[in-house]
Image (cartoon, grey):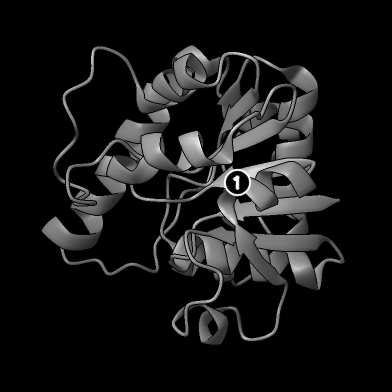
């Protein structure tokens, strides 16, 4: 699959490199692909292009930029009609987990409003990049929850999560990770805020994740 990563922060780089290791073609979309700061981050894994070039060349894009950058990045991306868009963002003020932006809806639903014809799935927003790099906790794997209105898009998103190590055991099926339609995105964003409270407020550190048991 041709995957476009919109953003070059820790989440985008971690996911992109993990998918490259699984055999996917990955393009990192950034504002300035010629910047000396970008290429060392990518470290030869995947190619770098502009945001618009990345959107055009990709079957699926992962939105991994800070919330305040989302409108500009989506404007640069252009036409994402009928493409799967993994919304990995949280509506945070200055990217601080304890301070949510004032929205009348969830961030995921706002992304859908901006991209009404894209196939948006809220995913990869409930834990930090460290867990995305290593979802295994001994013999257990962390759970990655997701939400969206497109059943096929959610199945593809779930498969991409499984490929990089989320819930590789059979204890929880893909259906049980499904939080519901995009209207459930707010629950996942609140879960991200709770993760931040445990990490920073309670000093548990960033290497904690979630596990759904049945």
Q: Please rate how many residues cluster around mark 1, counting C-alpha atoms within 10 Å: few if below 14, some from 14 to 19, many from 20.
A: many
Identify the residue at horizontal 61%, vertical 46% (top origin).
52
Q: Nearer the viewer, residue 14 or 40?
A: 40
Q: How many marks?
A: 1
Q: Nearer the viewer, residue 100 or 76?
A: 76
Give the secondary structure at mark 1.
strand
Relative to 165, residue 158 above or below: above
In this rendering, position of residue 8 left or right of residue 1:
left
Residue 212 placed where, x, y %? 54, 40
Relative to 201, residue 192 above or below: above
In this rendering, position of residue 118 left or right of residue 82:
left
| Quarter of the picture holding the C terminus | top right
Residue 112 placed where, x, y %? 51, 19
Identify the residue at horizontal 26%, vertical 42% (top origin).
193
- Residue 113 can be seen in this image: yes
In this rendering, position of residue 114 left or right of residue 134:
left
Residue beneath disc 1: 62
Residue 42 placed where, x, y %? 59, 78
Q: Nearer the viewer, residue 4 or 180?
A: 4
Residue 209 placed where, x, y %? 44, 56
């Amino acid at each position: 699959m041709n995957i476009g990563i919109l953003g070059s922060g820790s989440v985008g780089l971690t996911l992109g490199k993990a998918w490259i290791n699984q055999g996917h073609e990955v393009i990192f979309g950034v504002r300035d692909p010629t910047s000396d700061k970008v290429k060392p981050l990518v470290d030869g894994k995947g190619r770098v292009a502009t945001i618009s070039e990345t959107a055009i060349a990709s079957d699926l894009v992962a939105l991994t930029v800070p919330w305040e950058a989302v409108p500009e990045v989506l404007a640069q991306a252009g036409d994402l009609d009928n493409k799967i868009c993994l919304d990995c963002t949280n509506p945070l003020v200055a990217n601080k987990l304890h301070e949510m932006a004032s929205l009348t809806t969830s961030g995921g639903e706002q992304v859908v409003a901006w991209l009404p014809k894209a196939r948006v799935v809220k995913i990869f927003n409930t834990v930090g990049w460290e867990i995305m790099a290593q979802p295994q906790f001994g013999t257990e794997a962390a759970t990655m929850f997701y939400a969206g209105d497109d059943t096929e898009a959610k199945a593809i998103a779930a498969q991409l999560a499984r490929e990089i190590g989320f819930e590789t055991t059979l204890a929880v099926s893909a259906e049980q990770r499904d939080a519901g339609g995009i209207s459930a995105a707010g629950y996942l964003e609140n879960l991200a805020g709770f993760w931040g409270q445990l990490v920073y407020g309670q000093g548990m550190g960033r290497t904690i994740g979630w596990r759904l048991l049945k």
